Amino acid sequence: DVKVTQSSRYLVKRTGEKVFLECVQDMDHENMFWYRQDPGLGLRLIYFSYDVKMKEKGDIPEGYSVSREKKERFSLILESASTNQTSMYLCASSYGLGWAAGNTIYFGEGSWLTVV
Amino acid sequence: GIQVEQSPPDLILQEGANSTLRCNFSDSVNNLQWFHQNPWGQLINLFYIPSGTKQNGRLSATTVATERYSLLYISSSQTTDSGVYFCAVEQNNAGKSTFGDGTTLTVKP
């Protein structure tokens, strides 16, 4: 089975701290994604990456950066955390660019970040 | 950008009841998927269905791409069906997806 592992399930950070959220997938997937989920707003795409060292902005990239130095690992970075970044963050991966039959996207279990 | 609207936002059922969840989208799409998020946050793909009808056990889905909507049917609901159901679309195979706000389903025993 595909496994997408997010390093931290629950985090509490202070305003202004630098925060790293790590994600690792074990299926040699090319695409990796970071989403943010807030109540009533569904999932919103922050950044995605279709190859090592490549990244593309999603719908809400402001205040975030990403790093993909290895194919299996995709990191989300909050350079200076703010209270409005309190949310659940979901990492995902898929094989190939774009969706297609059989190209399922797999999600991690989520990281609940609280910024105080 | 494309808008994805799901209805109803909340649904409460007795175990054994049937339900229909709807997803409307504002523009043509290449791809559409339905997901279920369990109460612990795990999201699982249910269907990849850009058009046509698919069935998997008690769940089935239909997408009418020309009319820009998709339906998810749940028959003989069980308490384990509880959670949030998301519809998500992709327009141009470029990796960017847009999710609806979800339908929160509660199935009572």
Image (cartoon, rainbow, N blue to C red):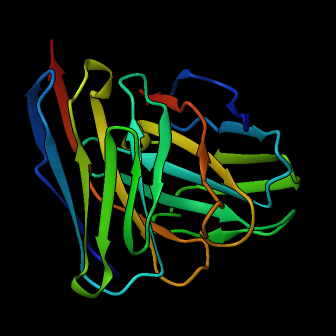
Q: Is residue B108 above or below residue B89?
A: above
Residue B6, x across and y down, in percent: 20, 58
Residue B31, x across and y down, in percent: 48, 73
Number of numbered discs visible in the structure rendering: 0
Q: Residue at x 39, y 75 (%)?
A: B51
Q: Residue at x 72, y 39 (%)?
A: A23
Residue B66, x across and y down, in percent: 27, 88
Quarter containing the N terminus of chain B = bottom left
Q: Is residue B63 left or right of residue A46?
A: left
Question: Can the viewer see residue B61?
Answer: yes
Tell me which corner region of the image, top left, top right, bottom left or bottom right, holds residue A47: bottom right
Q: Residue at x 49, y 31 (%)?
A: B42
Question: Can the viewer see residue A80?
Answer: no
Q: Is residue B107 left or right of residue B40?
A: left
User: Foreground residue, B107 or A67?
Assistant: B107
User: Foreground residue, A68 or B109?
Assistant: B109
Q: Is residue A23 left or right of residue B34?
A: right
Q: Is residue A7 above or below residue A69?
A: above
Q: Is residue B41 left or right of residue A51?
A: left
Quarter containing the C terminus of chain B = top left
Tell me which corner region of the image, top left, top right, bottom left or bottom right, holds residue B29: bottom left
Residue A106, x across and y down, in percent: 61, 46
User: Foreground residue, B41 or B77?
Assistant: B77
Q: Residue at x 53, y 57 (%)?
A: A63
Tell me which corner region of the image, top left, top right, bottom left or bottom right, holds residue A2: top right
Taking the view exactly as shown, the residue that stands out farthest to the top is: B109
Q: Is residue A72 above or below residue B49?
A: above
